[in-house]
Amino acid sequence: MTKQYTKLMLRGFNGECDAAVANVAWNNAERMEERVHKAFDALNQLGSVMQMSLTPEFLQLKLDELRLTHEYQEKRHQEREEQRRIREQIREDEKAQQELDKAREQAEREEARLALAGAQAEAVAAREALNALMGITATDAAWRAPSRLPELPASELSLQRLEADALSASLDIAAAKQRLRAAAAHADVANVSGWLPELKAGVSAERSGDWGVGPAVQLELPLFYQGQGEVGVARARMKREQHLYADAAVQVRSAARAVQSRLDAARRGVVHAHDVVLPLRERVVQQTQLEYNGMLVGIFQLLEAKRQELAAAEQFLSLRRDYWLSRLEAEQLLAGRRPRHD
């Protein structure tokens, strides 16, 4: 009987302790401990009839088990709270990132609008400057430039041909040559005039008793002064024109070489940009698009790749423009005019 009663007390107390351990949470440890103490006191009171009781050591073991379970539940609660806080922080960061992306997109859009307005203003100014050069005064002058620059020609003028044609067509050289001829002719005239006698004619009157009037002729021979001053000035002018003529030829040759160098450099730049740079940029955009589709990069990486592709295309157009400007300078040389650089 005593043994059965002992088992009953142990099963009752263990059941209460197991229930308390199973129901303990991070915020009800005191209530579960109180439940264990009440079960301990109630069972000891019932066992006092049979002079049987649960020991305080056994109670302490059950309380230790309860506290350990409570600590575990408290740690789990803290971990869940930390995870919740992290998730909230991530949501806040994502929201802030979305706002930042939106602000960046809006800023880029506004900057693009400003760039477009500036480009339109520059286009109007360039058109008006060209109208002034062409002598067009009408405000509604209806002329239109080609939508794109022409392709590069198959071959370029050789340097020797460009120099020869520019020398033969140069108006500066032709004018310098005419001035040289005029100065040489003036020097020859001054040299001959210095040795010619000066003949003077007039009327002479003499009185020898009565006054007599008759013609008078005076001949001066250049024995000591043969017009050396005038001859020196004429020869100095001729030498000056000779130097100017040679300088004009040097300037035309130098301009031809400079134009040819710019043409070659611009042509190489256009070919390299078309055959190498633009395909590479297109490949970068395609690869970035694939990575964006696979969610490996963000939208701004894709936009940056596209922006770099557009910058390469703009550089390509700039190189083509430089080529045709150099080509225009070559045509000016062949038309007899030396290009002027501000």
Image (cartoon, rainbow, N blue to C red):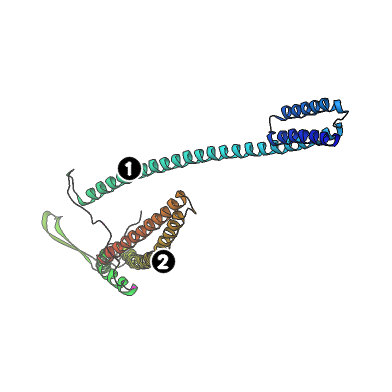
The question of residue 151 being in magenta is answered with yes
The residue singled out by tag 1 in the image is: 117
Is residue 148 shown left or right of residue 13? left
Rounded to the nearest whole Å, what is the CA distance between mark 2 and mark 1? 32 Å
**Residue 333 appears in which quarter of the rendering?**
bottom left
x, y percent for residue 301: 47, 52
Residue type at mark 2: give it.
Val
In the orientation shown, which residue stands out farthest toward the right?
51
- Residue 44, quarter of picture: top right
Asked if residue 106 is positioned above or below residue 288 in the image, the reply reads: above
* The N terminus lies in quadrant: top right
- Residue 111 lies, in percent from the top left, at 39, 42
Residue 301, compared with residue 244, is above or below; it is above
- For this orientation, the residue located farthest to the front is 1
56 left or right of 249?
Answer: right
Q: Nearer the viewer, residue 335 or 328?
A: 328
Give the magenta-colored segment's residue range. 143-158
Q: Name the disc covering residue 37, or none.
A: none
In the rendered image, residue 224 lying in the magenta stretch gets the answer no
**In the rendered image, which quarter is residue 110 located in?**
top left
Residue 324 location, x and y as percent? Answer: 31, 62
**Location of mark 2 (residue):** 276
Amino acid of disc 1: Ala
Tell me which residue sits at (59%, 37%) in the image.
84
Is the residue 96 above or below the residue 244 in the image? above
- Tag 1 or tag 2, which sits nearer the N-term? 1
Q: Residues within 10 Å of mark 2 (few under 14, many from 20)?
A: few
